[in-house]
Image (cartoon, rainbow, N blue to C red):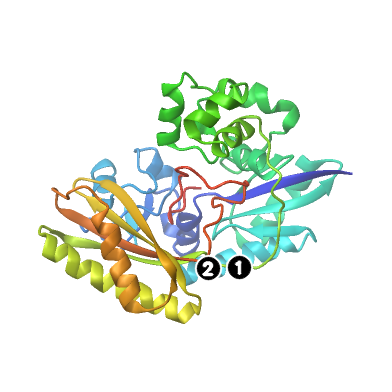
Amino acid sequence: MAAFVFHVDLDQFLAAVEVLRRPELRGRPVVVGGDGDPTKRGVVSTASYEAREYGVGSGMPLRTALKRCPDAVFLPVDAPVYLEASRRVMDTLRSFGFVVQVMGWDEAFIAVEADDPETLARDIQARVLERTELWCSIGIGDNKLQAKIATDAGKPAGVFTLTSESWMGWMGPRPTDALWGIGTKTARRLATIGIRTVDQLASADLDRLGVAFGPSTGPWLAQLARGEDASPVSDAPWIPKGVSRERTFQQDLATHDEVLRELDRIALETAEDVRKDGRPAARVVVKVRLIPFITKTRGVAFPAPSSAPEDIAAGARAALERFPPIERPVRLLGVRAEFGELEAVGGGLGHPMLDIRVSDADDG
């Protein structure tokens, strides 16, 4: 039997769970986010497929979602319910006896051996549906990168195979930000040196990429474009690399003093999370969202790791000073404390992501 990697992604997960709780919502546009009040500030965590037909998507302000789909049913995020639904799904995946790497509430990688991987994937779909009443899509690849990208091609409720043999034929003509790990900013930087498609990046001169992105990152980008990924599927317990708090303000922060006051408050809340974790923080990152919806981050590293609340608060202020002058009202502030040495993020593709598109919103 041949070895494959499956990527399992639950379709419209939060909305699907809510429809199971409220069958009368089936077929209606459903939006999950914030406290369920679309007149308040908050973002969409999940939109049902019916809502997506109106242009509603994950990460969108709830007020925008309301304008696009005024007839949608808006529901608050109910984390305990979603965690329990996720646990049942992951237990179902483990029942097949393969190594399962949980990536969040709604997705996981599975290392499988199979003569007929597509039939196995359909069997997994069927068992998940039978035990949880939830549909999932499954991407099949030779590695995690290929499987992750294949899943999107299979949505909704489908199975799609993308292996090394078919990789360039499928991915080659696509834009570089179609790759998992390359976001809009990196794609724009690649375009400035004449690289716009995956096949162009795969065949790009490594020295040229090294000059533009650094001697490590440049060749790694070409590796992504070739569909290469050596990171293993591991069921080792997930250890968070940091803790964070953020707050969206119903009334904008208009003055620097207001920003500092709220930043200190959030930093001290984050410091309490650091204390509970028991590991010292090595770095503090501040997130600022300005009117209308401009989000920026800046971070500072500590000379030595620390758990002291005053150090984390001072670090947050120091990070804030790295922003250019803030001349617009502030609608959101966040503070993240990161533990230990900074490591690769975004699923273990062997290199820190440049501007990976990651959020706590479910986008299945």
| Residues tagged 2 and 1 counted as in contact (Cβ below 8 A) | yes
Q: Quadrant of residue 22?
A: bottom left
Question: Do we see residue 51 in this rendering?
Answer: yes
> Foreground: 229 or 99?
229
Name the residue rendered at 27%, 53% in the picture.
322
* Residue located farthest toward the right when viewing the structure as drawn: 1
Lateral position of residue 166 relative to residue 63, left or right: right
Q: Position of residue 258 (x, y in %)?
A: 13, 65
Relative to 233, say whether 81 is above or below.
below
Name the residue rendered at 21%, 56% in the picture.
331
Q: Residues within 10 Å of mark 1 (few under 14, many from 20)?
A: some
Lateral position of residue 140 relative to residue 307, left or right: right
Considering the numbered disc 2 on the image, is that residue within a helix, a strand or a loop?
A: helix
> Foreground: 317 or 359?
317
Relative to 232, say whether 215 is above or below.
above
* Residue located farthest toward the left when viewing the structure as drawn: 255
- Which label number is shown at residue 83? 2
Q: Position of residue 30 (x, y in %)?
A: 38, 52
Q: Position of residue 162 (x, y in %)?
A: 69, 33
Relative to 148, say whether 254 is above or below.
below
Q: Quadrant of the N terminus?
A: top right
State the residue position of label 1.
Answer: 87
- Which label number is shown at residue 145? none
Name the residue rendered at 46%, 53% in the picture.
362
Lateral position of residue 289 relative to residue 277, left or right: left
Label 2 – label 1 distance at C-alpha: 6 Å
> Foreground: 281 or 121?
281
